[in-house]
Image (cartoon, rainbow, N blue to C red):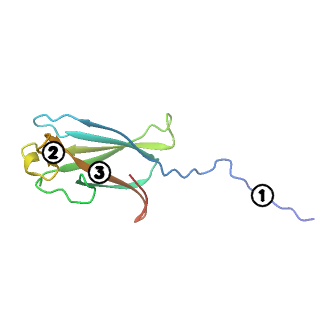
Amino acid sequence: MITLLITLQTTASIVNWDLLYQSVDSHFAEAATDDITLTYMIGAQREYSIELYASDCKTSITGMPSLNMVPMISQDYELDPLHDNLDVVIDVDVTEITSSNIWDESNDTLEFCSVVHLLSGVEVIKEE
C-alpha cells in the first residue's frame, strides 16, 4: 500500500504590486518642513524608490539646492492588509523657488514630477 501525503496551504501569499496615487497637499508656511505631501497607496511591504524631476519627468531639478524629500510608510493591516500608505513629504526653501526650473513665472505655479518605483531587488516592477 502506498500512501501519498499532500499538504495544501490554507493561506495563499498574495503578491500585490499596486501603486496608486492618492493626493497632493500643499501649504507653504515659514519654518514649515512639510510644504508638499504626496500620498500613494502601495502594495504591502514593497520596496520603493522616489525621484523628483522638472515637469517633463526627465530633467533634473535645478536652482533649489535645499529641496528635501522624506518618504514615510504607514499601515493599518486590520483595515487594509494588502496596502501601505506612502507619504512623500517635500520641504521647499521658498526663497529659492523663483530661481528654479520648476517655477512657472507666467502663472506663478510650482510644477514638478514625482516618479515612484516599486522594486524587486534592483529591478523596477511598477512605475507611477
- At 86% across and 62% down in the image, what residue appears? 3
Distance from disc 2 to disc 1, alpha carbons, whole Å, reads: 59 Å
Which of the two labelled residues, at mark 2 and mark 1, occupies the earlier sequence position? 1
Nearer to us of marks 2 and 3 is 3
Element on which disc 2 rests: loop
Circle 1 residues within 10 Å: few <14, some 14–19, many ≥20: few
User: What residue is pinned by disc 3?
Assistant: 114
- Label 2 crowding class (10 Å Cα cut-off): few <14, some 14-19, many 20+? many
**Which numbered mark, 3 or 1, is in the foreground of this view?**
3
Q: Residue furthest front?
A: 106
Camera-side residue: 99 or 80? 99
Which picture quadrant has residue 2? bottom right
The amino acid type, in three-letter code, at marker 2 is Val
- The reply to whether the C-beta atoms of the residues labelled 2 and 1 are less than 8 Å apart is no
What x and y, as percent, mark residue 124? Answer: 41, 62
Tell me which corner region of the image, top left, top right, bottom left or bottom right, holds residue 40: top left
Residue drawn at the location 32% of the way across and 45% of the way down: 72
Instruction: Name the residue that disc number 2 marks.
Output: 92
Q: Is residue 29 left or right of residue 76?
A: left
Q: Amino acid at mark 3?
A: Ser
